[in-house]
Image (spheres, coloured by chain):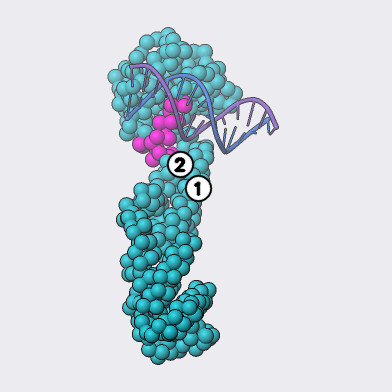
Chain colours: A cyan, B purple, C blue
DNA sequence: TGATATGATTGGAC
DNA sequence: GTCCAATCATATCA
């Protein structure tokens, strides 16, 4: 509104200017000062308003992109209008547009109008000077970019989050098949997000470029009727880019959110608890009960157990942690299980011994015993064996056949007491473990060392 | 559907 | 860093 007022004020001055230009006889001057200039001004304003009323598409359709921008008036040659007219003919625009434009360009008061517009513009430029500053890179965009890059959404396609997925899957301890299914599922969804992101980004970039061209062409076209400097066009382009980059930021933001949701879902799936398979539990229990005096597997033992069970070392640690606590809390409840595993390991050992004696060689219970814990198996099994031989443990009926087998085996091998004298191991009573001291004081002391020592009976 | 079992997590002590 | 103890969350079973 202010510009309009200024414009009109300027045009009032324009009337005076026109008067001065004429500078003819008094009669003519009088006539002109009264009627002709007013008519001229009204005429030129009408033309300007007509052009202003053009729609963007109309203006765009009759612009000449190949022309240098921001030159006032250009050529007044009507043939130039003809070029536009050619465009219009192609675009089907009404001819009166080129007439209007041509009329305006050829108007005798155009130079005066130009000087007024320049004057107004100078003032306007002064007021907007300093507004345009180089924007520093937006930290939020940088964060989003970094995240998208790290997740493998933007940038070159790579493992990206799938590496994290693999690690998480490994930590989940599920079977390899399960984890690979989850892994591929995760990768597929991430790829989907990536695809959508890139296609949207491309669309935005295309739209930005199209819109920028549109506006630039429009400004070039307008530069024929009002003074527009290249810098102004640049500024406008910068504004457009800012607008589009804010849209891009939204795209990046929602992509990040999508990735986060996907990840949290995946991690939830990882968190989903799965029972270890029967064989794994058996292996762990075997180790636990055969090392009941000191159920703290060494790092190597943990690794071996993990390998055997198809779980991670930390899962083995968790399992032993849980087992120790729960066993200690309720020894009675675990007694049957303890007996079962004691018998099992003892039977295994006895079988091996029997085979050895049958082969007419000295009984070496640790030779050829199954598993890596053969020696210690026999060690703690010995305890259970003694108990089973009448030291007051309750035997579940289901265990009786195994006990009988064990009795036969011990008879065959002469029992393990010989082994205790061999110096290869130190037998402990089941309840003589210092790790259980807090709840079950030992009746016979046989300190296996502090729990923190990560001592393994395999080292006995 | 509630009880129980069990793997995982967390916070503190050493 | 490991272990304990408590707790959570889910699976399994009766």
Question: Which residue lies most toward the front here?
Answer: A26
Q: Position of residue A381 (x, y in %)?
A: 43, 23
Tag shown at residue A261: 1
Q: Nearer the viewer, mark 2 or mark 1?
A: 1
Left or right: A270 as drawn, with respect to C1: right
Which chain does the residue under circle 2 lie in? A
> Residue placed at 49% from the left, 55% from the top?
A189
Magenta stretch encompasses residue A317: yes
Magenta stretch encompasses residue A246: no
> Residue placed at 37% from the left, 82% from the top?
A22
Q: Assess whether mark 1 and mark 2 are in contact (beta carbons under 8 angstroms).
A: no
Q: What residue is pinned by disc 2? A: A172
For the question of whether residue A154 can be seen, the reply is: yes
> Residue placed at 43% from the left, 89% from the top?
A82
Q: Position of residue A142 (x, y in %)?
A: 35, 51
Q: CA distance from mark 2 to mark 1?
A: 19 Å
> Residue placed at 38% from the left, 65% from the top?
A120
Q: Is residue A88 above or below residue A351?
A: below
Q: Which residues are magenta?
A: A303-323
Q: Is residue A292 above or below residue A106?
A: above
Local crowd at mark 1 within 10 Å, few (<14), some, or many (≥20)? few
Between A406 and A447, the one lying in front of the other is A447
Element assignment for label 2: helix
Between A51 and A173, the one lying in front of the other is A51
Q: Quadrant of the C terminus of chain A?
A: top left
């Amino acid at each position: 509104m202010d510009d309009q007022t200024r414009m009109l004020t300027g045009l009032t001055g324009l009337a005076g200017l026109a008067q001065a230009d004429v500078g003819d006889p008094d009669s003519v001057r009088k006539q002109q000062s009264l009627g002709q200039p007013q008519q001229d001004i009204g005429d030129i304003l009408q033309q300007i308003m007509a052009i202003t009323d053009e729609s963007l598409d109309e203006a765009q359709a009759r612009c000449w992109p190949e022309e240098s921008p921001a030159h006032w008036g250009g050529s007044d040659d009507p043939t130039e209008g003809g070029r536009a007219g050619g465009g219009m003919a192609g675009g089907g625009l009404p001819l009166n547009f080129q007439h209007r434009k041509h009329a305006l360009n050829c108007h005798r008061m155009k130079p005066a109008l130009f000087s007024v517009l320049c004057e107004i513009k100078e003032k306007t430029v002064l007021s907007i000077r300093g507004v345009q500053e180089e924007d520093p890179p937006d930290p939020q965009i940088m964060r989003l970019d970094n995240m998208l890059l790290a997740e493998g959404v933007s940038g070159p396609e790579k493992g990206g989050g799938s590496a994290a997925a693999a690690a998480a899957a490994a930590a989940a301890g599920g079977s390899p098949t399960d984890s690979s299914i989850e892994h591929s599922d995760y990768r597929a969804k991430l790829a989907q997000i990536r695809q959508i992101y890139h296609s949207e980004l491309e669309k935005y970039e295309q739209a930005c470029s199209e819109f920028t061209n549109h506006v630039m062409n429009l400004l070039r076209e307008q530069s024929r009727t009002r003074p527009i400097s290249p810098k102004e066009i640049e500024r406008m382009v910068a504004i457009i880019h800012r607008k589009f980059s804010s849209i891009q930021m939204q795209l990046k933001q929602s992509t990040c959110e999508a990735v986060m949701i996907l990840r949290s879902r995946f991690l939830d799936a990882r968190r989903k608890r799965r029972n270890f398979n029967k064989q794994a539990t058996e292996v762990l229990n075997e180790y636990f009960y055969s090392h009941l005096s000191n159920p703290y597997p060494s790092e190597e033992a943990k690794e071996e157990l993990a390998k055997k069970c198809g779980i991670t070392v930390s899962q083995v640690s968790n399992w032993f942690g849980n087992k120790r606590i729960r066993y200690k809390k309720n020894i009675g409840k675990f007694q049957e299980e303890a007996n079962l595993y004691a018998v099992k390991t003892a039977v295994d050992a006895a079988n091996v011994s029997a085979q050895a004696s049958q082969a007419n060689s000295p009984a070496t219970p640790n030779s050829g015993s199954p598993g890596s814990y053969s020696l210690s198996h026999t060690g703690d099994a010995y305890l259970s064996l003694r108990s089973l031989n009448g030291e007051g443990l309750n035997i579940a009926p289901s265990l009786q056949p195994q006990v009988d087998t064990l009795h036969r085996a011990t008879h065959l091998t002469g029992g393990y007491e010989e082994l205790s004298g061999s110096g290869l191991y130190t037998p402990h009573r089941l309840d003589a473990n210092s790790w259980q001291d807090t709840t079950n004081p030992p009746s016979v002391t046989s300190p296996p060392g502090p729990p923190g020592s990560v001592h393994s009976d395999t080292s006995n």
